[in-house]
Image (cartoon, rainbow, N blue to C red):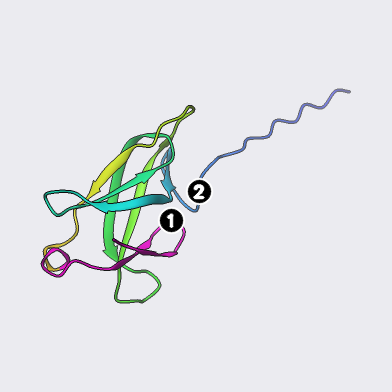
Amino acid sequence: MAVTLTVLVAASGCGANGDRTALAFTHPRWNDAGDLVVSTECATDLSVEVGTDHGGSDLWEVTVWGRPAMGRCRPAIEVKLPVEARTARPTKVVDGTTSMVVDLP
């Protein structure tokens, strides 16, 4: 009697949205228009969610979503912060994937 075992491994960071994964971001910076720009691992179909911190702080929580891809690349995405965050540029945000506080330049 032969037994076949199939194992499925889903590679999803700290959360998943369909076949998209929450991705930690790096290299936060401000562009000339005053928007926050962040980079992430090699991925396609990037989008970003901004909201209140699920941990209860008064910081904005930024979560980048995408489909991880093979290869070497560092895609960047603009983060459209709410109007009240743009009038007084924040000095920190929470990475929604890692729950880490990220200092902004």
The amino acid at mark 1 is Thr
The x and y percentages for residue 75 are 34, 37
Residues packed near mark 1 inside 10 Å, few (<14), some (14 to 19) or many (20 plus):
many
Residue 98 is inside the magenta segment = yes
Furthest-right residue in view?
A: 1
Image x and y of residue 35, in percent: 17, 53
Is residue 95 placed above or below 42 in the rendered structure?
A: below
Q: Are marks 1 and 2 in contact (CB under 8 Å)?
A: yes
Q: Quadrant of the N terminus?
A: top right
State the residue at coordinates (13%, 48%). 32
Disc 1 on helix, strand or loop?
loop
Determine whether the residue tagged by mark 2 lies in a helix, strand or loop.
loop
Q: Residues within 10 Å of mark 2 (few under 14, many from 20)?
A: some
Measuring 39% from the left and 43% from the top, which residue is drawn there? Answer: 40
- Mark pair 1, 2: CA separation: 7 Å
Residue sticking out furthest to the top: 2
Residue at 27 percent across and 43 percent down: it is 77
Asked if the magenta segment contains residue 60, the reply would be no
Side of 99 where 88 appears, left or right: left
Residue shown at 28%/61% (left/top)?
Answer: 105
Q: Where is residue 47 in the image (x, y as percent from the top left)?
A: 29, 43
- The dot on residue 4 is none
For label 2, the residue is: 13
Give the amino acid type for the residue marked by disc 2 in the picture.
Answer: Gly
Residue 94 at what x, y percent from top left?
Answer: 36, 64
Residue linked to disc 1? 97
* Span highlighted in magenta in the image: 85-105
| Residue 45 against residue 39 in the figure, above or below | above
Occupied quadrant, residue 88 = bottom left
